[in-house]
Amino acid sequence: MLDSTDRRLIAELQRRADATAQDLGDLLHLSASQAARRRARLESEGLIKGYTARLDPAKLGLSVQAFVQVQMAAHNADNAASFVRLVTTLPEVVGCWTLTGEADYLLRVWVTDLPALNALIHHRLLPHPAVSRVQSQIVMDQPKADSGLPV
Amino acid sequence: MLDSTDRRLIAELQRRADATAQDLGDLLHLSASQAARRRARLESEGLIKGYTARLDPAKLGLSVQAFVQVQMAAHNADNAASFVRLVTTLPEVVGCWTLTGEADYLLRVWVTDLPALNALIHHRLLPHPAVSRVQSQIVMDQPKADSGLPV
DNA sequence: GGTGAAATCTACCTAGG
DNA sequence: CCTAGGTAGATTTCACC
């Protein structure tokens, strides 16, 4: 249901989604029509959920990336739903995860500068009634940028 | 140099990179040729670095996502370079950041199951001579998936 | 795996501010 | 002079063989 050619195909599409069917065929030693057919199948199966542009944060004026750990005052569904609603409305928050362990939420944020990070924390996150504690760590370096999923 | 139309354009391309010039033109109330020209300009300027496919982890058999904090035994350039080399060769590690604070590296990993996570930690990370301590937290839920950068 | 019609892109042209 | 819209040729996709 997913052979090694499919895996090489999706690996390449994670690297370069604008590859043409001809490009993919050349890479996989397949005809363009076969490569296109495989890609269409992976899309319709939902394995490929879509395509996105990779942007340069610096060229958007985003110089500070940080991870923010957020602890909740109480662990109930209302608090959680309300906080998640807040987080989804904040464009600077590009990812949010709930983890095992003590911190309730881990946020990944991109902001223009340090004052913007402080504003986010003190004027958006901390005022929320369900939030009890917020701890942020700035990203100094990113030795491995978001590579795609392992295939 | 980057007007509101450009911003709406890149926002849409983060959402749906396979939009045609016609689609983008309709959205932005521009002709297809102008939308295509703006996209080409943003690509050549490097603001759009490329395009990638978004995959469904579950359909790839990846059921466990985790964040792994790694502390180094000593803080010197050789150790760091050696560890970064290791990390870049591990496909399960889809992101690696160095943060302010006590943990030296934060890794984001995708694995098939919990044993695979343990194997990664105990057979790949901990045996590295520069690594002193490893702490992992499993992702329970992802209320906000990797949304694009704020534009 | 191949083919042709349809869609799309791209380079060039013209018009208007 | 710069930006927008239009057009034709080249490229790519897609449905069918």
Image: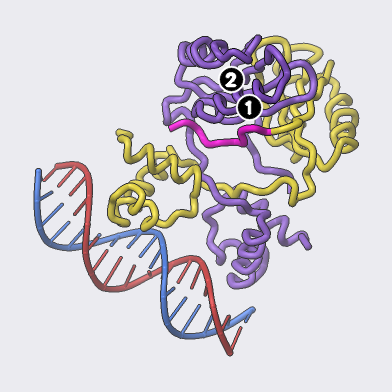
Chain colours: A purple, B yellow, C blue, D red
Q: Quadrant of residue B127?
A: top right
On-image quarter of the N terminus of chain A = bottom right
What residue appears at the point 66 percent right and 43 percent down from the top-left corner? Answer: A148
Packing grade of label 1 (10 A; few <14, some 14-19, many >=20) is few
Position of residue A14 measured from the top left corner of the image (x, y, whole percent): 62, 48
Counting labels gives 2
Residue at mark 2: chain? A
Is B70 colored magenta in this rendering? no
Residue A146 in the image: above or below residue B26: above
Residue found at x 88% / y 31%: B118
Chain of residue at mark 1: A
Q: CA distance from mark 2 to mark 1?
A: 23 Å
The disc placed on residue B37 is: none
Residue assigned mark 1: A81
For residue A125, side relative to residue B45 (left or right): right
Image coordinates for residue A117, horizontal then vertical, percent: 51, 15
- Residue at (64%, 54%) from the top-left corner? A48
Residue B82 shows up from this direction: no
Residue depth check, mark 2 versus mark 1: number of the one nearer the observer? 1
Residue A66: which numbered mark, if any? 2
Segment tinted magenta in the rendering: B142-151
Q: Position of residue A95 (x, y in %)?
A: 60, 30
Q: Is residue A82 above or below residue B47?
A: above
Q: Please indicate whether residue A26 sits to the left or right of residue B128 in the image.
A: left
Q: Is residue A55 above or below residue B20?
A: above
> Which amino acid type is shown beneath numbered disc 1?
Ala
Identify the amino acid type marked 2: Ala
